[in-house]
Image (cartoon, helix red, strand yellow):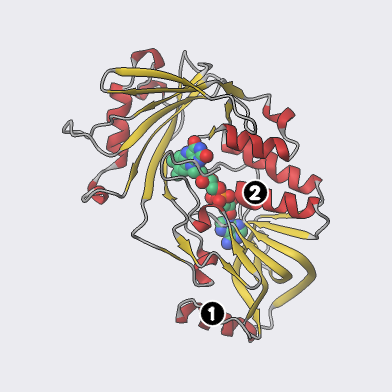
Amino acid sequence: MPHEIPGSLDARVAVNRLELRDDVEMSKRYDALVIGAGPAGASAAYWLAQNGHSVLVVERKRFPRDKTCGDGLTPRSVKQLTDMGLAEPLSDFHRYDGLRSIAHGVTMELAWPQHPDFPDYGYVVRRRDLDEMVAERAVKAGATLWQGCEAIEPTLENGIVTGATVKHKDTGTLENVSARYVVVADGANSRFGRALGTTRDRKYPLGMAVRGYYRSPRHDDPWIESHLDIVDRSGDHVPGYGWIFPLGDGRVNVGVGLLSTFSGWKDINTSKLMETFVDVAPSYWGLSADTADGPVTGGKLPTGGSVTPNVGPTWIVAGDASGSINPFNGEGI
Ligand SMILES: Cc1cc2nc3c(=O)[nH]c(=O)nc-3n(C[C@H](O)[C@H](O)[C@H](O)COP(=O)(O)OP(=O)(O)OC[C@H]3O[C@@H](n4cnc5c(N)ncnc54)[C@H](O)[C@@H]3O)c2cc1C
């Protein structure tokens, strides 16, 4: 039985309108079309290509591109990247041993545990470097990557998703990409996923976080650091944490994050929270407005598998698009 897209009327109208277009070129048919070349899309593309499937990844930006993040890779991420053959390029980046956790005057240095499956170390890698590395790996495995190319609408045949219309941003040309399966990995806002009818359940926690880079004498510290007792301007504690993650290149990634689990969370100004955190962070990091390296930027963290439906007969939603971030620590890579 044909699958009806459960999306809004607008989404269905957009799809119907598309069927009337005559300004759209047709591409060859792929086994899989992956939308978005962040960690979710690029790793899906890698595994599909590695297993012999023809894969096209469309990415609306061009590498190298940044993505607002804490840049922290836990042992779980390192394992995933190692499984994709990326252990060697990863080893050029800053490796750390565990978490220094600080709250209410107590400091604990918690080394990553010995584990049968996961390494006992992590890395801190700027997303500008990491995402290009993973996308290149997918291409090396046989995936085709179109950069500067945005998926703008799903295409349908008899109610089944059969690909997408993509826009080549340089030329403005539209092209219909046809695929047996579509992997939607377009990040936290997931416009493409919403066009397929996905929604985020607001009962689940949503994270909001901001980060900036700072030059620091402790840029090669062997611990990432988290502060579990962050306060707002009036000195009241807020549910969230601040972090300082050393990059090993002269800089540290500094940020604060909150969960939407308390009333009034929308009234918290995260930029001000960040300023306060930088003011009160331990002096050994040397953080101040003078050591800031670039602007503070922020983003949403959809957590806990909060987006549904995350699968249809011919499509699947992955990564932030499916709300897959761990609500405990904000880990989504
Ligand atoms: C401030 C902050 C700090 C964080 N810190 C950490 C951390 O330290 N460690 C950790 O593990 N996680 C962290 N996270 C979470 C992590 O950044 C995300 O979970 C992760 O990036 C999700 O990867 P993704 O591939 O699903 O999405 P993204 O990384 O957002 O990638 C989506 C990609 O899709 C592209 N795209 C979007 N729409 C389209 C379209 N229509 N057509 C084509 N391309 C499209 C985008 O350009 C982008 O490249 C943090 C998040 C924030 C906001």
- x 41%, y 41%: residue: 328
One can see residue 68 in this view: no
Q: How much space separates mark 2 and mark 1, taking CA atoms?
A: 27 Å
Q: Look at the numbered discs 2 and 1 and tell me whether their residues touch, using CB distance below 8 Å.
A: no
The residue that mark 1 highlights is 14
Question: In this figure, what is the number of numbered marks?
Answer: 2
- The x and y percentages for residue 169 are 64, 60
The residue that mark 2 highlights is 62
Crowd rating for badge 1 (residues with CA inside 10 Å; few <14, some 14–19, many 20+): some
Instruction: Look at the image and tell me in which quarter the N terminus lies.
Output: bottom right
- Vertical position of residue 111 compared to residue 275: above or below: above
Q: Secondary structure at mark 2?
A: loop
- Vertical position of residue 149 compared to residue 21: above or below: above
- The x and y percentages for residue 153 are 59, 72
One can see residue 193 in this view: yes
Residue type indicated by callout 2 = Arg
- In the image: residue 197, left or right of residue 84: left
Instruction: Look at the image and tell me in which quarter the C terminus lies.
Output: top right
Q: Secondary structure at mark 1?
A: helix
Q: Is mark 1 within 8 Å of ligand 1?
A: no
Q: 238 or 29, which is in the foreground?
A: 238
**Going from the N terminus, do you reach mark 2 or mark 1 first?**
1
- x 37%, y 56%: residue: 204
- The x and y percentages for residue 146 are 72, 56
- The x and y percentages for residue 298 are 41, 43
Residue type indicated by callout 1 = Ala
- In the image: residue 37, left or right of residue 198: right
Crowd rating for badge 2 (residues with CA inside 10 Å; few <14, some 14–19, many 20+): few
